[in-house]
Amino acid sequence: MNPQRNWLPYWLTAPGVLMALAFVALPLVITLSLSLYPFLPGGGVGDQMTIANYADVARDDYFHVIFARTFGMAILVTLICIVIGVPEAYVLSRLSARWRAVSIVIVLGPMLISVVVRTLGWAVLLGNEGVINKLLLGSGLVNEPVKMMFTFTGVVVALVHVLVPFMVLAVWASLQKLDATTEQAAQSLGAGLTTVMRRIVFPQVIPGVLSGGLIVFALAASAFATPAIIGGRRLKVVPTTIYDEFLGNLNWPLGAALAVVLVVIVLVVSMGMNRFVERRYKQVFQ
């Protein structure tokens, strides 16, 4: 006789599953279905299913440039966050308990403020009359304001500031599992700091770098507020283009198709990088 099934775990997870279905799965299904209908002049949606919207995205060089800019920006932001976040997380893991608590508050502090407020702060700093340009002009380093607003560089700087805490936390979590005695053993055998970091520390924090990189990449590719405020109307990325198609042109099917393509590319890149890093990670430790 089979023992009676315990339904308690299912009942406990049911609210979370229902919330995910209602606020994640259902909107994605609706977006996918909307992308398969034609756009009618005047803001209407046709009745016959079609892939014309995806064909427009695939054929139009305008969308190719926007997708290339979006993912180029996401890759660059991810690399910069890795360069900044990994050493910062390593230093954080080596601090005393008191200073570690203070440092974690400093790292998490920006995440407690709305991304819009942080981005507006960068707009104040990067503007032609902003703090940075005033300092540069006052010091005599430049003769005219340096254009930083509505540029690719300005958006990258603001996104790095917004997203680097995710990288720091992911790598710091991996460093908690690192055995400090392995570093001491390597140093006692004559290994320098560079060798210890390259041969011992970094291979063991690859999972944290991978998870943090995937989070940063996905958030950077789908970021809307920061590119919209810092990049403005001149520097189009996929999320701002989706916004324009939905609310500017009222072309909901094309906007939905762009959203679906964005989600698919992010998923494919994330899973591909995950498989690649896992394969290399296994080769290193086999």
Image (spheres, grey):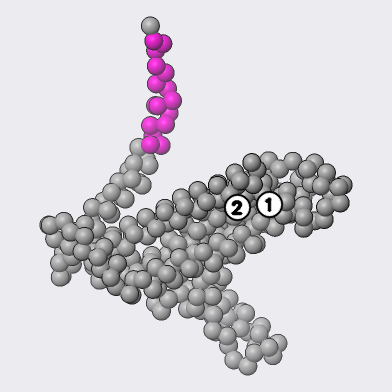
Q: Position of residue 159 (x, y in %)?
A: 53, 65
Q: Nearer the viewer, residue 244 or 153?
A: 153
* Magenta extent: 2-17
- Asked if disc 2 and disc 1 are in contact, CB closer than 8 Å, the reply is yes
Q: Disc 1 designates what residue? A: 202
- Quarter assignment of residue 63: bottom left
Element at label 2: helix
Q: Which residue is mark 2?
A: 209
* Residue positioned most to the left: 47
In the foreground, 72 or 241: 72
Q: Secondary structure at mark 1?
A: helix
Decide if residue 17 is on the left or right side of residue 97.
Answer: left
> Around disc 1, counting alpha carbons within 10 Å, would you say few (fewer than 14), some (14 to 19), or many (20 or more)?
some
Kind of residue sitting beneath label 1: Phe
* Magenta span includes 9: yes
| Residue at 37% across, 60% down | 262
State which quarter of the image contains the C terminus. top right
The residue drawn where x is 81% and y is 47% is: 186
Does 120 sit left or right of 228 as displayed?
right
- Residue name at image x 32 percent, y 57 percent: 260
Residue 233 figure quarter: bottom left
Q: Quick one: which residue is furthest to the top in this view?
A: 1
